Image: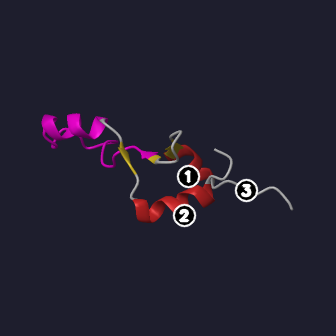
Amino acid sequence: MPKLKSHSGAKKRFNLTKTGKVKVAKAFKSHILTKKPTKRTRRLRHGGYADVTTEKTIHKMIPYK
């Protein structure tokens, strides 16, 4: 069986925890931050976890991570 290719976009965006959960950074934090409230940008700093329904797909995209 040949080696599987990892999805290069997924490699950069997702990390896995020891238990198998998928860690994700919050969206809308890259630019146009002046019009967003400071409270909102502060909340966006903290990451989150991917939804359980999409976890299986992400695991397929990054098989060796």
- Give SS at disc 3: loop
> Given the current orientation, which residue lies at the most extreme front position?
19
Disc 1 residue crowd, few under 14, some 14–19, many 20+, Cα 10 Å: some
Reading the image, the residue beneath label 1 is: 10
Q: Position of residue 6 (x, y in %)?
A: 67, 53
The mark nearer the N terminus, 2 or 1, is 1
Q: Residue at x 35, y 40 (%)?
A: 47
Q: Position of residue 1 (x, y in %)?
A: 86, 62
The amino acid beneath tag 3 is: Lys
Give 1 or 6, whichever is nearer the viewer. 1
| Real-space CA distance between mark 2 and mark 3, rounded to the nearest whole angstrom | 14 Å
- Give SS at disc 1: helix
Please say if 52 is above or below 17: below
Tell me whether the residue at label 3 lies in contact with that at label 1, contact meaning CB atoms closer than 8 angstroms.
no
Reading the image, the residue beneath label 2 is: 57
The mark nearer the N terminus, 3 or 1, is 3
> Residue 33 occupies which quadrant of the picture?
top left
Q: Which residues are magenta?
A: 23-45
Tell me the mark number nearer the camera, choosing from 2 and 1.
Answer: 2
Quadrant location of the C terminus in the rendered image: top right
Q: Residue at x 13, y 40 (%)?
A: 37
Residue 60, magenta (yes or no): no
Tell me whether the residue at label 2 lies in contact with that at label 3, contact meaning CB atoms closer than 8 angstroms.
no
Disc 2 residue crowd, few under 14, some 14–19, many 20+, Cα 10 Å: few
Give 43 or 52, whichever is nearer the viewer. 52
Residue 44, magenta (yes or no): yes
The amino acid beneath tag 2 is: Thr
- Give SS at disc 2: helix
